Image (cartoon, grey):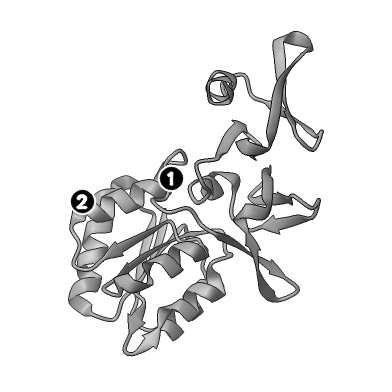
């Protein structure tokens, strides 16, 4: 795992880095600390990462601008900040957790578990998903998403009106951000269950999920029991 810490207080930065190294152990491949947003921007422009640990106030600069610029990227973001009043706004933008200062190693471990465990959910679902289009960031309302299809390292958001938008996060990473109404029905599909109509048997003991729109999606064999339970 590749981790970037953005924090201007040296003592706090060392603490975050020390905790992250202990929590991640051998899973940690690379960790860097940036003390300014400019330095962080430069690193993000040229270095692939898996998780951003971001303070929202660096020497008076607003971290929300950095978040807005990069929230559409493939990595997860965890906010570590004393500005608890900004937690809701951060969650709405799609961060996976908000760790309020002061914090313990256990609290950071809980946040990082949401990154390392694809089945773990964020404590607050995102209200918007940011997608990059023609050099700009566009917000898509989660309420408008019907289902998500995995597309290699990316995801395709299929909207209620039929539009499709490509998102930089993988299906596994998006799963942690979406509301509990979304269920993983197949290795390549996350579906809003309120849009489901019925499970339909297929030849060879397989199943498909029929949506109210009439569209049918494949159901993985290992996913079928849990899906059937939720649809009862």
Q: Residue 86 falls in which quadrant of the image?
A: bottom left
| Relative to 209, residue 167 above or below | below
Residue 131's x, y, as percent? 66, 64
Residue at (33% x, 73% y) in the render: 85
Q: Position of residue 44 (x, y in %)?
A: 51, 72
User: Does 135 sit left or right of 129 as displayed?
Assistant: right
Quick one: label 1 or label 2, which is nearer the N terminus? 2
- 229 vs 24, left or right, is right
Q: Is residue 21 visible?
A: no
Question: Which residue does the image show at 65% across and 52% down from the upper left?
Answer: 154
Q: Nearer the viewer, residue 45 or 189?
A: 189
Q: Which residue is mark 1?
A: 121
Q: Secondary structure at mark 1?
A: loop
Please tell me whether residue 212 is drawn above or below residue 13 in the rendered image.
above
Q: Which mark is residue 103?
A: none
Mark number for residue 106?
Answer: 2
Q: Is residue 116 visible?
A: yes
| Residue toward you, 26 or 215 | 215
């Amino acid at each position: 795992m590749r981790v970037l810490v953005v924090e201007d207080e040296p003592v706090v930065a060392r603490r975050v880095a020390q905790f992250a190294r202990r929590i991640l152990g051998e899973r940690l491949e690379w960790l860097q600390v940036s003390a300014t947003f400019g330095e962080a921007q430069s690193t993000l422009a040229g270095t692939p990462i898996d998780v951003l640990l971001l303070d929202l106030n660096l020497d008076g600069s607003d971290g929300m601008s950095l978040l807005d610029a990069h929230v559409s990227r493939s990595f997860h973001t965890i906010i570590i900040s004393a500005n608890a009043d900004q937690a809701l706004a951060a969650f709405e933008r799609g961060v996976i957790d908000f760790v309020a200062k002061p914090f313990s190693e256990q609290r950071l471990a809980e946040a990082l578990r949401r990154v390392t465990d694809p089945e773990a959910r964020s404590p607050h679902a995102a209200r918007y998903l940011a997608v990059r289009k023609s050099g700009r960031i566009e917000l898509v309302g989660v309420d408008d998403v019907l289902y998500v299809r995995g597309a290699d390292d990316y995801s395709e958001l299929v909207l209620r009106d039929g539009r499709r938008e490509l998102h930089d996060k993988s299906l596994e990473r998006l799963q942690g951000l979406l509301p509990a109404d979304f269920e993983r029905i197949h290795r390549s599909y996350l579906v809003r269950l309120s849009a489901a109509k019925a499970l339909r048997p297929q030849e060879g003991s397989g199943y498909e999920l029929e949506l109210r729109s009439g569209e049918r999606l494949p159901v993985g064999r290992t996913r079928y029991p849990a899906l059937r339970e939720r649809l009862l």
